[in-house]
Image (tube, grey):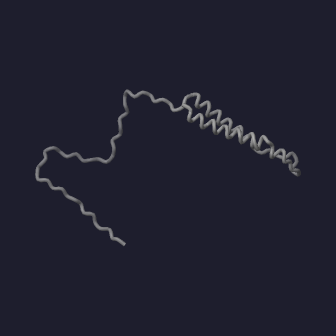
């Protein structure tokens, strides 16, 4: 175990006198003033990008709605065709993947 040793402060002694007052240094940065002649910045996305993002969200929501489970007409019988239909197993996941791909394209489109 090591003991904490007291820290010695260094003292600088000068032999010449200074006539100008010494300013204290501050560590906090001064806030920047806003430029008065600044141009408004451009938006990152344009109208077409937002339309593609909305279409991507629509495809994902449609795929989720198509994948949502239904109910059996009779609770005493099991019908595989209602649960494992091609619409729920194939089409709905493909729509969701297409929506995600369209979202990526919308983000990276210039």
Q: Nearer the viewer, residue 48 or 18?
A: 48
The quadrant of the rendering that contains the C terminus is: top right
Query: Which residue shows up at 33% across the image and 44% down it?
Result: 29
Q: Position of residue 9 (x, y in %)?
A: 24, 60
The quadrant of the rendering that contains the N terminus is: bottom left
85 left or right of 102 in image: right
Above-or-below relation of 60 to 13: above
23 left or right of 55 in image: left
Q: Residue furthest bottom?
A: 1
Q: Quadrant of residue 56?
A: top right
Q: Residue furthest left?
A: 16
Above-or-below relation of 76 to 42: below
Q: Position of residue 89 (x, y in %)?
A: 76, 44
Query: Which residue shows up at 57% across the image and 35% down it?
Result: 107
Q: Quadrant of residue 33?
A: top left
Q: Position of residue 60 (x, y in %)?
A: 68, 39
Q: Position of residue 96 (x, y in %)?
A: 68, 40
Q: How many marks?
A: 0
Query: Which residue shows up at 44% across the image and 28% down it?
Result: 40
Q: Nearer the viewer, residue 87 or 32?
A: 87
Query: Which residue shows up at 55% across the image and 29% down it?
Result: 46
Q: Quadrant of residue 49?
A: top right
């Amino acid at each position: 175990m090591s003991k904490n040793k007291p820290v010695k402060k260094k003292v600088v002694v000068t032999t010449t006198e200074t006539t100008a007052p010494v300013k204290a240094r501050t560590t906090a940065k001064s806030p920047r003033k806003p430029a008065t002649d600044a141009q408004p910045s451009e938006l990152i996305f344009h109208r077409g990008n937002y339309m593609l993002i909305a279409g991507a969200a629509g495809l994902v929501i449609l795929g989720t709605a198509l994948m949502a489970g239904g109910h059996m007409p009779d609770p005493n019988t099991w019908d595989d065709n209602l649960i494992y239909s091609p619409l729920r197993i194939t089409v709905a996941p493909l729509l969701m993947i297409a929506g995600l791909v369209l979202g990526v394209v919308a983000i990276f489109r210039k």
